[in-house]
Image: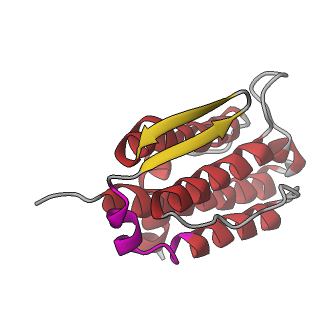
């Protein structure tokens, strides 16, 4: 059995974004139970020079939609990075998942031999499609999801490893 570029990318982005949304649910429940203002979480940083929690969610969204778009050879939807609240963050995650649902397996897999150019300030990174996914896109995506997880954990939200790995799936099974 072979695994396609699509199989490694789109379902991974999708499921992890669903888990990220479940982090928000747990954080909101924890804030309500312990009397914590949600801005404690939205503004959280591990150190002063890092992006806050809200920006980590935005960048995880950007990584998923940008990665999927580059792999499929389509335009990613533009999002303005204006979210400040949990409902807005949930909406952004939902919009990102909705975009991922439009990306076809055929489009991604047809570009498995494509060259992907990623402009960055002062340079352009050039990858084969598989290298882009495995060496840049997925690591970048997981960096921001992991950072969001760590920010909530540091603020006392009771998240564990299984929330990261199977959060949405666990929530659905418990319902």
The x and y percentages for residue 141 are 55, 45
State yes or no: residue 4 in magenta. Answer: no
Give the number of callouts.
0
Which segment did they paint magenta?
Answer: 100-112
Q: Quadrant of residue 111?
A: bottom left
The x and y percentages for residue 83 are 85, 58
Q: Is residue 48 left or right of residue 171?
A: right
Q: Residue at x 43, y 66 (%)?
A: 169
Tell me if residue 117 comes above or below residue 4 in the rendering: above
Q: Is residue 121 left or right of residue 37?
A: left
The x and y percentages for residue 139 are 49, 37
The x and y percentages for residue 53 are 76, 42
Tell me if residue 138 comes above or below residue 74 in the rendering: above
Q: Quadrant of residue 117?
A: top right
Q: Residue at x 63, y 35 (%)?
A: 150
Q: Quadrant of the N terminus?
A: bottom left
Tell me if residue 165 comes above or below residue 169 in the rendering: above
Which of these two is toward me, 54 or 153?
54
Q: Is residue 164 left or right of residue 29?
A: left
Residue 10 in view in this figure: yes
Residue 19 in view in this figure: no
């Amino acid at each position: 059995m072979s695994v396609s570029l699509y199989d490694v990318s789109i379902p991974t982005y999708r499921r992890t974004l669903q888990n990220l949304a479940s982090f928000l649910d747990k954080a909101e429940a924890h804030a309500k139970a312990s009397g914590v203002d949600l801005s404690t979480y939205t503004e959280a940083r591990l150190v002063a020079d890092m992006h806050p929690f809200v920006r980590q969610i935005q960048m995880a969204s950007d990584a998923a939609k940008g990665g999927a778009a580059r792999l499929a050879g389509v335009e990613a939807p533009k999002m303005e990075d204006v979210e400040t609240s949990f409902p807005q963050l949930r909406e952004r995650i939902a919009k990102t998942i909705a975009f991922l649902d439009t990306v076809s397996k055929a489009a991604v897999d047809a570009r498995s031999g494509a060259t992907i150019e990623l402009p960055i300030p002062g340079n352009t990174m050039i990858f084969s499609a598989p290298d882009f996914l495995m060496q840049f896109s997925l690591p970048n995506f997981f960096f921001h999801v992991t950072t969001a997880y760590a920010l909530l954990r540091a603020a006392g939200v009771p998240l564990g490893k299984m929330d990261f790995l199977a959060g949405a799936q666990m929530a659905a099974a418990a319902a």
